[in-house]
């Protein structure tokens, strides 16, 4: 037999498996021990710290050509990666709405990587677990068993999935075959002026354009104005557009405001609109015993986007799109080439999960969610949501009680918007003071906050989506904000 070009008959075959499994076992035990300590002691470390120049330079090294012992590779990680995280697992990380992970979920991610299954579908255990986790999420949100869903990377993709199904269901033509140009009337989608930016991206990706998404004003509580929405729908019909979908928000990114989902469900039924809920922040309030009433009506949605890596605290990344009409969901994405046809038995006899989204190759995201839910039970996760909402209310009261601070928006759930009053400062000077407070809180490793603008006012924003946060952390935040405000004002550092 001829030897393939470039491959000598005497060349030893290679593998990525270690030459000595015993050495790898020892190092792996060390890594697990370090990981336990990393989480156990997280409260003792800075929330965030700037990387020194030599650490930044480490990431400019050229492509490795030859081997490095695994122990040395891990030493590089411990020196240059682990001490400089974004910080979202820390109890005082409140900058963005992310979730704070959990150790069991991390073990799940490790085991998923070890098993190495591709969740495009097929007849194997990981695929069944993927479907089981989707079923559990349907139960949490009050969706019927007949509904479908898919695990995705996160909320942005989950919203795109739901809105794609909405577009196709309301297009009036086979938009997959003929495209959006074949529609008799341009579609209109509606959401509040507090809508997440991923919805603009969705409109653009779906070929509808940003102007297809009409932003509706909000009320004093920053919830969508139902009367203004009804008026906008009537105007668009008269102008020759086809109102297609209303997007309700269960927890806005700026303040956590929750639209009146029951009123939106009624309006959508009256106007024959698809009702989509962006629940990436607040959908899972449905499992919280003290606060579930806040998202009443979410179970009436045609589709929901949610994020298990937020209030189920799964390690990044895992989102979920749920669609009430399973047939419409599959019809929006399914393609069956001959190399992906089902067989009556064997590996290809299982369900093809890629028929419900854009990815053909899909990671085993379900295991980390499944393991944590099995360990703790859904009731504990519900109590943790109630705990974060109570902490949001506590922080709001602490701010109201402090003369130098003020709330800048109503605190509806667990997002608190406030600012330092600044001793008579206004406009850009007041913004500069609060921005400097935020940056110093980060740089001193005390707490990670973000800032935003609500009703034209710049403010600091605290999003308490963290199972490690305690009352003492909130007291510390208020105390340090007051201290930094005094120091910056005296030094004139905020310019």
Image: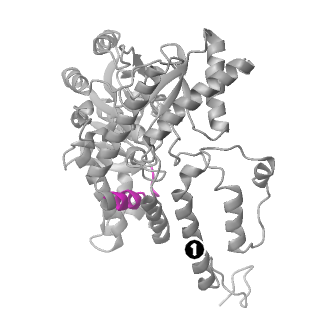
Q: How many marks do you count on the picture?
A: 1
Circle 1 Cα neighbour tier, 10 Å, few/some/many (<14 / 14–19 / ≥20) = few
Instruction: Give residue 299's position: percent from left, percent from top.
Output: 22, 37
The C terminus - image quarter: top right
The N terminus - image quarter: bottom right
Q: Is residue 314 left or right of residue 172?
A: right
Residue 335 in the magenta stretch? The answer is no
Residue 371 in the magenta stretch? The answer is yes
| The magenta segment | 359-373
From the viewer's side, name the closer residue of 464 and 195: 464
Instruction: Give residue 188's position: percent from left, percent from top.
Output: 37, 21
From the viewer's side, name the closer residue of 319 and 470: 470
| Residue 156 seen from this side | no
Instruction: Give residue 285's position: percent from left, percent from top.
Output: 30, 39
Quarter of the figure with residue 235: top left
Query: How did the renderer colour the structure?
Result: one colour
Q: Is residue 369 above or below residue 403?
A: below
Q: Which residue is mark 1?
A: 28
């Amino acid at each position: 037999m001829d030897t393939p070009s470039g491959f000598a008959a005497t060349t030893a075959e290679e593998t990525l498996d270690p030459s000595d499994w015993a050495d790898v076992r020892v190092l792996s035990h060390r890594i697990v021990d370090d990981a336990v300590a990393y989480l156990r002691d997280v409260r003792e470390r800075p929330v965030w710290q700037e990387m020194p120049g030599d650490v930044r330079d480490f990431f400019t090294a050229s492509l490795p050509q030859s081997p490095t012992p695994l122990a040395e590779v891990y030493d590089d990680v411990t020196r240059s990666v682990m001490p400089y995280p974004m910080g979202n697992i820390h109890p005082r990380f409140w900058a963005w709405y992310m979730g704070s992970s959990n150790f069991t979920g991390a073990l799940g991610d490790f085991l998923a990587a070890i098993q190495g299954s591709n969740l495009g579908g097929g007849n194997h255990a990981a695929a069944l677990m993927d479907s089981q986790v989707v079923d559990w999420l349907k139960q949490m949100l009050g969706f019927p068993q007949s509904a479908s869903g898919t695990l995705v990377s996160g909320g942005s993709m989950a919203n795109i999935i739901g809105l794609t199904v909405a577009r196709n269901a309301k297009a009036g033509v086979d938009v997959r075959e003929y495209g959006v140009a074949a529609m008799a009337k341009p579609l209109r989608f509606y959401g509040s002026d507090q809508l997440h930016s991923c919805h603009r991206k969705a409109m653009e990706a779906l070929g509808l354009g940003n102007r297809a998404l009409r932003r509706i004003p909000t009320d004093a509580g920053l919830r969508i104005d139902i009367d203004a929405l009804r008026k906008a729908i009537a105007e668009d019909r008269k102008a020759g557009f086809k109102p297609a979908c209303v997007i309700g928000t269960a927890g806005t990114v700026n303040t956590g405001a929750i639209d009146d989902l029951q009123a939106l469900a009624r309006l959508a039924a009256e106007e024959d609109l698809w009702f989509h809920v962006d629940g990436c922040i607040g959908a899972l309030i449905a499992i919280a015993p003290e606060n579930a009433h806040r998202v009443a009506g979410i179970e009436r949605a045609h589709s929901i986007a949610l994020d298990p890596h937020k209030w189920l605290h799964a390690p990044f990344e895992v989102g979920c799109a749920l669609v009430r009409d399973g047939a419409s969901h599959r019809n929006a994405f399914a393609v069956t080439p001959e190399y992906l046809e089902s067989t009556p038995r064997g590996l290809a006899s299982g369900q093809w999960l890629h028929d419900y989204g854009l990815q053909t190759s899909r990671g085993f995201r379900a295991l980390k969610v499944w393991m944590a839910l099995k360990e703790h039970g859904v009731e504990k996760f519900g109590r943790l949501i109630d705990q974060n909402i109570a902490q949001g209310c506590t922080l709001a009261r602490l701010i109201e009680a402090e003369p130098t601070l003020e709330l800048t928006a109503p605190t509806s759930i667990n997002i608190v918007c406030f600012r330092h009053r600044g001793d008579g400062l206004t406009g850009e000077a007041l913004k500069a003071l609060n921005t400097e407070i935020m940056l110093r809180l980060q740089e001193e490793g005390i707490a990670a906050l973000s800032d935003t603008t609500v009703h034209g006012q710049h403010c600091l924003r605290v999003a308490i989506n963290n199972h490690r946060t305690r009352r003492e952390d909130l007291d510390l935040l208020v105390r340090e904000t007051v201290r930094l405000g005094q120091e910056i004002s005296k030094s004139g550092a905020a310019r």
